[in-house]
Image (cartoon, rainbow, N blue to C red):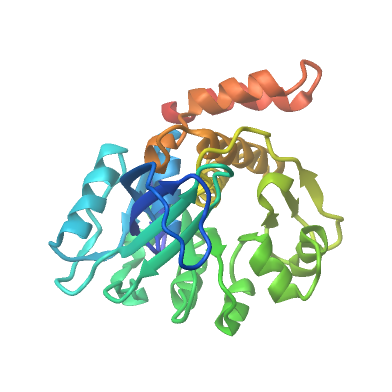
Amino acid sequence: MTRPQPVFDVLGVGISAVDDTLTVKTFPGAGAKVPVLASARHGGGLACTAVAAAAVLGGKTAYVARFGNDDLSDYIRKILLERGVDISHIIPDAAGQPYHSRIVIDHASGERTIFYDQSRFKPVDVADMPEHLLASARVLLVDFLTAPGPLELIIKARRLNVPVVIDIEGQSAEAAPLLEQVDHLVAPEEFATWFSGKHTPEAACAALARAPRAATVVTAGAAGCWWTDSADRKPNHQPAFLMQAVNTNGCGDAFHGAYALAVARGFSIAEAVLLASACAAIKAAGPGGGWDALPTAARVAELLRQRLAASDTRRDIIGRIENLGNF
């Protein structure tokens, strides 16, 4: 099959969620009674938030899921559209629905605890993704929490020469075959250290790196991330951009979306990690939380202009970031 000219920078397949948040002064212990400082409803989910983040940065994105006509499904459709995400490939399914999460946010630290209901979430099957749709993307972004995983979909995309970025969490043995197939593994420290058996994110990154994968990235929140584009090269450290965290929910997903968009636009791995780190930091510090805190390309460029020294050769990326929406 001759691959057509791509239509989308990032095509996302994976978890969506409606997040109902409660902010409290500090997270309580068992049996406590505490007042709620604020409550809100936001969009969430690994792949869904990542695609929204890429769209807000100026990318051309699409999201695929199985949704019904219920309130939660309608809400996700609405907020994806508001951010410019193509939802025309969402599959009508009366039994399908996003995750429904209740999230308690610790106002003092910005950290969050998530309680989620996945009882009506129905994963997209490889048969739901025709070749022409996969081939329309520069990058396929998928996620994984529990079985069944998107292994067949990943293999199908790679057969069409579409690079795959994966957001992988949880502690499931079914993750192993996925790691052998993806082009870009971007995983949080918790998964990476568990799966690799190593005790630090740097050591886990080195252990997980393998040919012919294009890159392995291990994120560690305020400690930054470690990345390598070769199993023979020591991982590089990208420090986090220090910000006053307001709400860390979705920061890792924003990282994935920015990273995938950078790959789609031909950025180097070092540049993709830099863009993604800045995007995640701004998301964490954003007032209001949720997708309203996802940064534009102009906001990311502003942060890098402020934080990178005048002599830092990486400042060359700023102009390219500002033009993400003009591709």
The residue shown at (75%, 65%) is 209
Q: For the point 65% across and 19% down, which residue is it? A: 305
Image quadrant holding the C terminus, namely top left
Nearer to us in this view, 90 or 302: 302
Q: Is residue 5 visible?
A: no
> Looking at the image, which is closer to me, 93 or 210?
93
- Image position of 57 with respect to 140: above or below: above
Residue 3 appears at what percent x and percent y? 42, 56
Residue placed most toward the observer, 55 or 145:
145
Residue furthest to the top: 310
Residue at 32%, 38% (x, y): give it.
83
Residue 227: x %, y % from top left: 74, 52
In this view, 6 is above or below 183: above
Instruction: From the viewer's perspective, tell me whether residue 81 is left or right of residue 253.
Output: left
Above or below: residue 5 compared with residue 128:
above
Image location (x, y in percent) of residue 200 = 80, 62
In-front residue for pair 196/265: 196
Q: Which of the 4 quarters of the picture holds residue 131? A: bottom left
